[in-house]
Image (cartoon, rainbow, N blue to C red):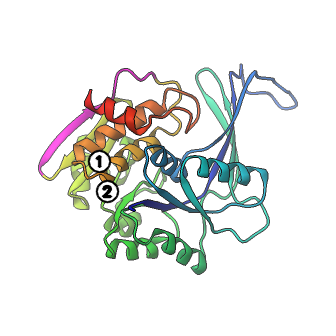
Amino acid sequence: MAFIAGAGATNVDLLYENMPRIPNIGEEIYTDKFSLQLGGGLPATLINAGRLGIEAKIATELGTDIFSEFAKEKFEENKVEPTNLYKGSGIPLNITSAIILENDRSFITYGKGSIEPDEQAKEEFYNIAKGAKICMMSPGGFIDVYKRLKDEGTIMVLDMGWDDELTFEKYDELLKIADYYTPNQEEALTITGCSNARDAAYALKKYFDKVVVKVDKDGCIGIDGDDYFFCPSLEQFKNVDSTGAGDAFLAGFIYGLFHDYPLKGCIEFGNITGGKAVTAVGALSAYVNEKELLELKKQ
């Protein structure tokens, strides 16, 4: 059976909602709404893909702590098969406390951000990803594995996230491996040095025949060969919290690739899953299942 795979750090979010303000030093403020959730990033995309009926595998770092046990439970609940790369005795996850105000938010995060794999971890990831139809890529130490998978015919999808030093020169090797890259508007403008999203999309033709640039809440630009188009966002989705919107978009986009849709169809799926994700607080709170996704696509 075909599947998708990826390697990345697991993030857990402690969300304190309805906060009237950020407490001053020495103060304690109570709220009546709290949730513990898996956070955004590559694991969130794989979970959203699992919810759409795609078999998904992740290589990540999990310990024996309560947060790791929570993460394992959520992976399995959402049909994502985790392989643990962690050999230590500490807490290997990124744990974020998010204080959510009416119009803003503040974060405190424990963790190292990303996985720093040794040769054994790289081989373990390759073993679970070998034969995948699609592999999700991210910056880090797995580039040799990405090359092997690419040579074997796996479709490689890159989502890097923000970096103050986001340039073609810095990420040239990753971009050359990727079949698809899904930057948002700010990332696309920064990496290309262009002043508008359309020009940035055309600048990305340096690496890709099929180009994707997410234009925030408005929708997404696509270029398929010589065909330039724009797919607007769905108006029925009200933005409550944009956390995880990019991860959810990527899940819908990958759903389209997995089922061999043309680029425009993949982007339309991404707009649906990304749009639904912003309707509730947290990276994984609001989502569509496969039936809902296909019905919205028809509309």
Left or right side of 157 for 299: left
Q: Is residue 46 above or below residue 21?
A: below
Mark toward the start of the polypeptide (1 vs 2): 2
> For the point 51% across and 40% down, which residue is it?
244
Residue 282 is situated, as x and y percent measured from the top left of the image, at 58, 34
Please say whether residue 125 is one of the residues in the magenta stretch: no
**x and y percentages locating residue 199 in the rendered image:** 23, 45
Q: Is residue 282 left or right of residue 108?
A: left
Q: Residue at x 20, y 47 (%)?
A: 223
Please give the label number shown on residue 212: 1
| Numbered disc 2: secondary structure | strand
**Residue found farthest to the front:** 1
Question: What stretch of residues is rendered in magenta?
Answer: 226-238
Q: Residues within 10 Å of mark 1 (few under 14, many from 20)?
A: many
| Left or right: 109 as drawn, with respect to 169 | right
Q: Which mark is residue 180?
A: 2
Give coordinates of residue 228: x percent, y percent: 16, 43
Query: Where residue 66 sits in the image (x, y, percent)?
Result: 78, 51
The quarter holding residue 130 reads: bottom left
